[in-house]
Image (cartoon, helix red, strand yellow):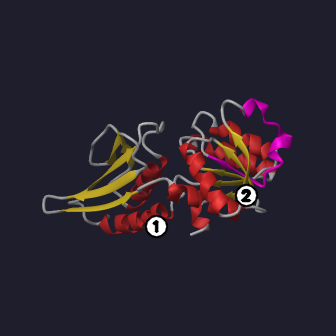
């Protein structure tokens, strides 16, 4: 499979390593320095694109791939306010999009655990739920896309929580403490606290390899498909 990489930072390099190990070829490495030189003909050398750039460039990159009829796997977060618009464009172009707030298999299993625990805790009003997420100092979006997914799962199951915030702490608000430090790949902790005891679940990434592997598997899955897919379609 021939892959075009949008973004060639630390994640892009991890994806390249995994892709080569799985006998794929990287035919394009697209960055802010050379993206103005990339043509539709260049993109047609690839079978699929994997996008890990920035929230500021991701929408343009998605549209570029739609126009080139190139399936795209998107790992960048911070663009979901525009999801309905992208969904319409994907349908109009008969294009292919795979997106996820997190491509790690472990995180997606954690999503399942989080949803089930929230379902159990809904009837126990003595417990207040909160979240802490820690990422490297280079991460631009706060809270993380993974934290937003976790928060929405909790809000969907726990009736006393109606929204989330990184600033407000109130009975109806799920408080998310967002921390940016060092080169932390990603840690997410869900806490249920009462006067009697605490319950915590945590996912802690040790490196970026799990994210990179998931993105390459998603690219393999997306090839020759049309429409919009997520990690739920793989798991």
Residue 218 visible, this angle: no
* Relative image position of residue 219 (x, y in whole percent): 68, 59
- Specify the quadrant of the image occupied by residue 204: bottom left
103 is higher (above) or lower (below) than 55: below
Is 118 in front, or is 103?
103
Is 22 in front, or is 86?
22
232 to the left or right of 122 = right
52 to the left or right of 210 = right
Return the residue at label 1. Answer: 109
Q: Residues within 10 Å of mark 1 (few under 14, many from 20)?
A: few
* Relative image position of residue 125 (x, y in whole percent): 24, 61
Q: Quadrant for the C terminus, please.
A: bottom right
85 to the left or right of 165 = right
Residue 164 visible, this angle: yes
Query: Can you tell which mark lies on residue 8?
Result: none
186 in magenta: no
* Relative image position of residue 179 (x, y in whole percent): 34, 41
- SS type, badge 1: helix
* Relative image position of residue 55 (x, y in whole percent): 57, 37
195 to the left or right of 113 = left
Which residue appears at 60% of the width and 46% of the height?
A: 12
Which residue appears at 40% of the width and 62% of the height?
A: 157
Q: Nearer the viewer, mark 1 or mark 2?
A: 1
Q: Residues within 10 Å of mark 2 (few under 14, many from 20)?
A: some
Is 179 in front, or is 3?
3
CA distance separating discs 1 and 2: 24 Å
* Number of numbered tags placed on the structure image: 2
- SS type, badge 2: strand
Return the residue at label 2. Answer: 227
The residue range painted magenta reads: 35-51
12 is higher (above) or lower (below) than 116: above
- Labels 1 and 2: the sequence-earlier one: 1
């Amino acid at each position: 499979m021939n892959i075009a990489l949008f973004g060639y930072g630390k994640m892009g390099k991890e994806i390249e390593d995994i892709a080569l190990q799985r006998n794929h070829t990287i035919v394009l490495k697209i960055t802010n320095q050379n993206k103005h030189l990339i043509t539709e003909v260049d993109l047609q050398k690839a079978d699929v694109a994997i996008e890990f750039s920035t929230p500021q460039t991701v929408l343009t990159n998605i549209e570029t791939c739609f126009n080139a009829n190139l399936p795209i796997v998107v790992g960048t977060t911070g663009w979901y306010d525009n999801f309905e618009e992208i969904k319409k464009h994907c349908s109009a172009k008969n294009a292919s999009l795979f997106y996820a707030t997190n491509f790690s298999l472990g995180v997606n299993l954690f999503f399942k655990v989080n949803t089930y625990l929230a379902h159990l805790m809904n009837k126990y009003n003595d417990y207040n739920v909160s979240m802490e997420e820690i990422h490297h100092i280079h991460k631009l979006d706060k809270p993380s896309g993974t934290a937003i997914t976790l928060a929405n799962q909790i809000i969907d199951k726990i009736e006393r929580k109606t929204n989330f915030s990184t600033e407000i702490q109130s009975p109806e608000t799920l408080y998310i403490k967002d921390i940016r430090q060092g080169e932390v790949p990603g840690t997410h902790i869900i806490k249920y606290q009462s006067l009697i005891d605490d319950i915590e679940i945590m996912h802690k990434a040790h490196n970026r390899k799990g994210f990179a592997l998931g993105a390459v598997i998603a690219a393999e899955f997306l090839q020759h498909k049309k429409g919009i897919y997520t990690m739920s379609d793989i798991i």
